[in-house]
Amino acid sequence: MRLMSRKRCRQRQRCRRRIRNCGSVALVAKRENLPGQKDDNYQVVRGISPPDLPEDILRHIHAKMTLRDAARAACASHTFERSWICFPNLTFSPKTLGLNGNASTDVITRDLISKVDQILQNHSGIGVKTLNLDLLECGNIDFSYVESWLHIAVTPGIEELILSPPLVTFSVYNFPCSLLSNGSGNSIQYLELGHCTLHATVGLGCLRSLTRLHMFRVRTSGDELWCLLSNSSALVHLELWYCKEIISLKIPSLQRFRFLDVVQCDSLQEVESNAPNLTKFRYSGLLGQISLGGSLQVKTLRMICPSQTNILCWYAHNLLSIAPNVETLTISSSSETVNTPMLSGKFLHLKHLEILLGGMAAYDYLSLVSFLDASPHLEKFVLAINQHRMEHDSILGGPSHDLRQIREQRYDKLKNVKISGFCSAKSLVELTCHILENTTSLDCLTLDTTSWYLRCSVTKSSKCYPLMDRDSLVEAQKALLAIRRYVLGKVPSMVKLNILEPCSLCHTVEPLM
C-alpha cells in the first residue's frame, strides 16, 4: 500500500509539472463548475493517454478543437501539450476565454488582457493560421498589448487576421501596416479590420494571397485604400461598411475581383471599378457617380438608397450603361415624386427584379410597366411598398370601368409575381390587372396586405412584430376589398393566388362593408 501510495504521489507530481509547463493553458481550461473537469484530471492521474495515433494526426485533431477544448487537452496530454505552443487557430474574445459576461467592463478587460497575454507569451508564434482579436466588449485598453499580440501571432503562414478594437476607442488605434511586410502578409487570405485607422501608404507589403477584405468603420482615404488594393492582386471580395472618410473609391484592374459591397459610406461621391470580371455589386447609401467600366460581367446588382428620391427615374436613364447584362436587380427608393419613364433600352438577361418603395401619395404605380416592358426574359417580379403613413387615391367607390388600359405587352417568361404592402391605390390595382391580362406564363401571384411585418408563427414571442397600427389595419381591409372587386375575376384558373391578410390572432378589426 505504501508503494502504491508513493507511485500515486509521483504521478500527481508529474501531472502538476505538466500543468505548470502549460502556462496559460491552465488559465483557459479553468472554469468553475465545468462538467467533466475532474474526470480529465482523474484520467491524467491514472496515466490515460490519447489514442495510439501518429503525432501528426493528433496535431491535426488538436487544431480542430475550440480554444478552450484545445487548452484542456494540452493539460491532459504530452502530445497536445507540445502542439499547444503552435496551436493554429487563436480566437480571443470574452466568450471563447470563458470570462464572466456579467462582470464590469474593467474586470472583463483586465481578465482578457491577462489570459491573452499569457497565452501568446507562451506561444511559439509558429503555425498560426487564424488570429481573431475580438475586443469590442472591452473598455480602454493599452494598445501596447495589442501591438505585442499582433507581432507574436502575425508571422509568415498566417491565413486569417481579424481585429476589432474596443468601441470606446473608435478609430484611435492605428493598424500597423508594417506588420504585413517582410513576408508576413504574403499568406493572408482573409483580412477584417474594424474600428481603427489605416494608413496603407507606409510600410505595406505585398498581399499576394489576399482574397477577401472587410473593413468596418475604418478611417482611411480613397488613396490609401487604392494602395492597399494595388498590392492585392488575388483579391476577389471587398466589403466597405461605414467607412465615412472615403470620398472616391477606385478599384484597380484586378483580374480575379468578383464582388464589391459598399454600405453607408456617407462621404462617398464616386465609385469607379476597372476590374473586368466584377459580377456582383451591392451598394447602400447616397447615390453618386457610378462607373463599372462598362463591365459585361455584372450579373447581380443591388442598390439601396433609403434617403434619396426619384431613384427609379435615375435607373431608367443610367442602368443600361452600368450593367447591361444584369440578371438579378434590386433597387430601392424612399420616395418618387415623378412617374417612372420608359427605360432607354432592353435588358435581355434580367430574370429577377425587386423594387422597394416608400409610401408615396402621387406616384403612379402603373408606370412600373416600363421595367417589365424592358425585360422580355423576366421570370420573377417583387414589389415591396412601405405602407407607413401612405396616402393615395383609393380605387374604392369608383366605377370598375374607370380602370386605365395601356397598350398590350406580352410577358411570356414571367412566372412569379409578389406585391408586398398591397393597398387599395388605384394605380396599384391597375398594375396588378395589367400583369394578369398580359402574362401567359404566370404560375403564382402573391398579394400581401401586411407589408413586411413578421408574423407570430416565426417570432420568438409568438406575436406579430411590429403590431400593425389601426390605420394600417383599415388599409389592409380596403386592399382585401379591392382584390375581391377588381382582381379575383381576372386571375386565370391555372394561376395560384396567395392573399396574405393581417393575423387574426394578433389583430382585430371590423371588416368593411
Image: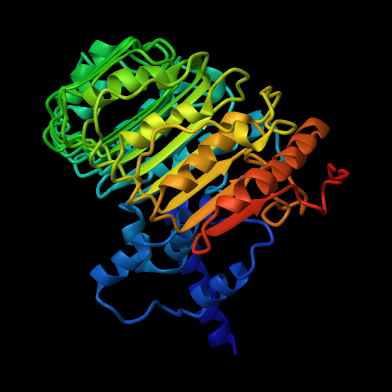
Q: Is residue 464 left or right of residue 321?
A: right
153 or 251, nearer to the observer:
251
> What is the quadrant of residue 178 in the picture?
top left
Residue occupying the point 60% across, 21% down: 360
Percent of width and height locating residue 460: 72, 53
Percent of width and height locating residue 96: 52, 49
Percent of width and height locating residue 288: 35, 12
Residue 70 appears in the picture as rendered: yes
- 119 over 235 or under it: above or below: below
From the image, which quarter does the N terminus lie in?
Answer: bottom right
Residue with the most extreme front position = 401
State the count of labels: 0
From the image, which quarter does the C terminus lie in?
Answer: top right
> What is the quadrant of residue 193 in the picture?
top left
Residue occupying the point 41% across, 49% down: 439
Residue occupying the point 60% across, 55% down: 498
